[in-house]
Image (cartoon, rainbow, N blue to C red):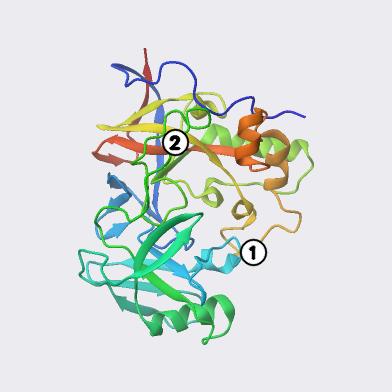
Amino acid sequence: MPGVAKSALQGDLTMPSEWRAVGEVSKLNIFPVKSLAHVEVDNFDTGTFAAESGSMVDRQFAVLDKKDKFTTSRKYPTMSLIEPEVTQTHLTLRYQGMEDISVKIPGVKSLDGCTEFEIFGDFCKGFDLGPEVGEWLSDVILNDPEGGMKLLYHPKIASSRPDKPKNEEIAPNTKPGDKPYFADTFAYMLMSEPSVDEVNKLLEEEDVDLVVEEKRFRPNIFIKGEFPAFAEDSWAYIKIGEAIFRNARACDRCVFTTVDPFMGDKHPQGEPLKTLRKYRCAEDPAEKKAFGTAPFLGVFLAVEKLANIKVGDNVLIGQH
């Protein structure tokens, strides 16, 4: 069965001095609240821990359950239909059939006295934004206002996540400081149009009645160009505008890919994850041990040079 021979970057991983153009930015997205709907933007600033656009910061808010476990659309797919709007002082959430709710964003610059929880083994911290928004989220997600959901907020300071351990075999281009606020693992994720097109070809070959779009894969940066599918896997450094990103490692995928971003439900046959597992899983023994049956699609990025990037910017890759 075909797969990915080795996802870890190989060869010279030093910062390049020369670049060549491969495409351009097609879409930019910010996800203010982890696992809720995205906000498409024309441009964003590349913060160390998250993309920033106006008052929005990527994954600066997260939903916890009554046991203080982080909650996502993997379990509750309707979360992906809740639409956030962020101003300088307030976060507003909207969901069809419910009255909007607006909650004040605290003007704090530290994490003293906050709630501690885990995201995939990483301890992190955030401020509980109160029972009213918790009840609203419980009503939408659980159909039970007393369900105990909470909304947490991370101020725009250094991320509370721990440094990443070094693993030369699995992720040789990852650095200890490559951490986000409440995103799963890294601050940025990039995908390409050729890769999404190839996924659709694979689905057609497998006689799956589904056409996917980039939206369900939730990239911050979506690019297009005349390059092969999955080419981004091997790009160690990517320059967009004046920003320079480092390819931290391949993005391993989960059941979230089965959530229809327009309907808020899961595909009954578990697609496209089932097909991705057939064609895009690790073949390398060490990577198999690390990622199991999670297939690769897209790449996680860390930012090396901060700048503003915008839709239409040229995308360049390093060459030695």
For image coordinates 52% across by 74% down, the residue present is 67
Quadrant of residue 311 in the image? top left
Rate crowding at label 1 as few (under 14), some (14 to 19) or many (20 or more) other CA atoms within 10 Å.
some
Residue 50 in the image: state x and y as whole percent.
Answer: 33, 49
Residue 226 in the image: state x and y as whole percent.
Answer: 49, 24
**Identity of the residue furthest to the top in this view:** 320
For image coordinates 41% across by 63% down, the residue present is 33
Residue 42 in the image: state x and y as whole percent.
Answer: 32, 48
For image coordinates 28% across by 72% down, the residue present is 113
Could you tell whether 265 is left or right of 31 in the image?
right
Quadrant of residue 206 in the image? top right
Q: Give the number of the disc on residue 200.
A: none
Q: Label 2: which residue?
A: 223
SS of the residue under disc 2: strand
For image coordinates 66% across by 41% down, the residue present is 292
Question: Mark 2 belongs to which amino acid?
Answer: Ile
> Is 264 above or below relative to 218?
below
Residue 275 appears anywhere in the view: yes
Q: Label 1: which residue?
A: 265
| Alpha-carbon span between mark 2 and mark 1 | 26 Å
Front residue (pair 221, 123): 123
Could you tell whether 238 is left or right of 82 in the image?
left
Could you tell whether 250 is left or right of 312 in the image?
right
Residue 97 appears anywhere in the view: no
Residue 53 in the image: state x and y as whole percent.
Answer: 28, 53
Where, quadrant-wise, is the N terminus in this rendering? Answer: top right
SS of the residue under disc 1: loop
> Is 241 above or below relative to 31?
above
Rate crowding at label 2 as few (under 14), some (14 to 19) or many (20 or more) other CA atoms within 10 Å.
many
Question: Mark 1 belongs to which amino acid?
Answer: Asp
